[in-house]
Amino acid sequence: MAVSETTARTQADIGRYVSDTWRDRYFAACDAVYALGPPALAEQDVETKFGTTHVYRYGPTDKAAQSRTPVVLVHGAGSCSAMWYPNTPALSADRPVYAVDTPGDPGRSVQREPIHQPERAAQWLDETLDGLGLERVHLVGTSYGGWLALNQAHRRPERLASVTLLDPGGLEKVGLRFFVWIFAGLFATFAPRKLRPRLAAWLEQPVLVMPELRTMIRTAIRAYRIRRPAPLPLTEAELSGIRTPLYLVLGKRSLLLHPERQMERVPRLIPGARAEIITGTGHGPQIDHAQEMNRRMLAFMASVD
């Protein structure tokens, strides 16, 4: 278990829990979501310059699969590694998987220094991979975790076998429509049960009809204070310098990005990059179409290996 959040230095840009009681309530809500997927083989705390990073390790039982290049999963803002429960079964059956709780977001990591600046974020992730003893990984990030992965490919690509971006940040400035969608989804969590399926379909928010996810998200809002600005997108010059094999997945109804624009732009700027638009989803293709996305991600990683 990581050291208590209350020991972290109080600072304007350091995320924190409002109290130990609310932290424990959030951990309980997370554990209910983790239980929807396979149990982790192990949990590990990695010390970095920026704080303690909590990591969940999943893995295959097949010895040949154990030797394959591992996957590292980086979640979106306001969440934790529990959000990967639809993906860890298939991914960890094929190769080792490490799911990272990002410092500065609710989870079991403890932040002591800011990491929202691009160079600091890249250093934090590199130190985390080094502490795990991972020399080469397939990095997968969604939303804010997509920005972290894209930033890593630009600034510290040495350990990266590939990068998979799931409706990521880092390609466009976060617009008002995305924040409106986020707040609408939060208000919808308080809607009567009978209305939630209709709201979930309208808002592309599957959390509304999953009791465990709904509880985890609502508890996170009460329990944790995120203290960082929205990341700025990478410039075209920065994107053009990326040489890591890259797979970009865009939700057809994404409100974070303009899918058609990025479908053309990213392969043009990044040599060899693959880009796909997934219909029937918005900001969460790996949740809305978990089985298909697991298959596509593993096929991409196998092609790189």
Image: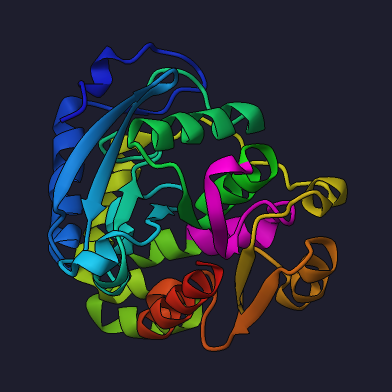
Boundaries of the magenta span: 157-183
Q: Residue at x 65, y 33 (%)?
A: 118
Relative to 58, say whether 25 is above or below.
above
Q: How is the image coloured?
A: rainbow
Tell me the residue at 25%/36% (across/down): 108
Residue 205 seen in render: no
Q: Is residue 106 left or right of residue 27?
A: right
Q: Nearer the viewer, residue 62 or 241?
A: 62
Residue 7 relative to residue 159: left or right: left
- Residue at 40 percent across and 54 percent down: it is 73
Q: Is residue 185 above or below residue 49?
A: below
Q: Position of residue 200 (x, y in %)?
A: 40, 78
15 or 52, which lies in front?
52
Q: Is residue 242 visible?
A: yes
- Total tally of numbered discs in the picture: 0
Q: Is residue 244 magenta?
A: no
- Counting from the top left corner in percent of width and height, residue 161 is at 54, 55
Drawn side of residue 128 relative to residue 3, left or right: right
Q: Nearer the viewer, residue 124 or 261?
A: 124
Question: Where, quadrant-wise, is the N terminus in this rendering?
Answer: top left
Q: Quadrant of residue 47?
A: top left
Asked whether 174 falls inside the magenta stretch, the response is yes
Residue plotted at (41% across, 47% down): 78
The image shows residue 285, relative to residue 27, as above or below, that is below
Q: Position of residue 27 (x, y in %)?
A: 17, 43
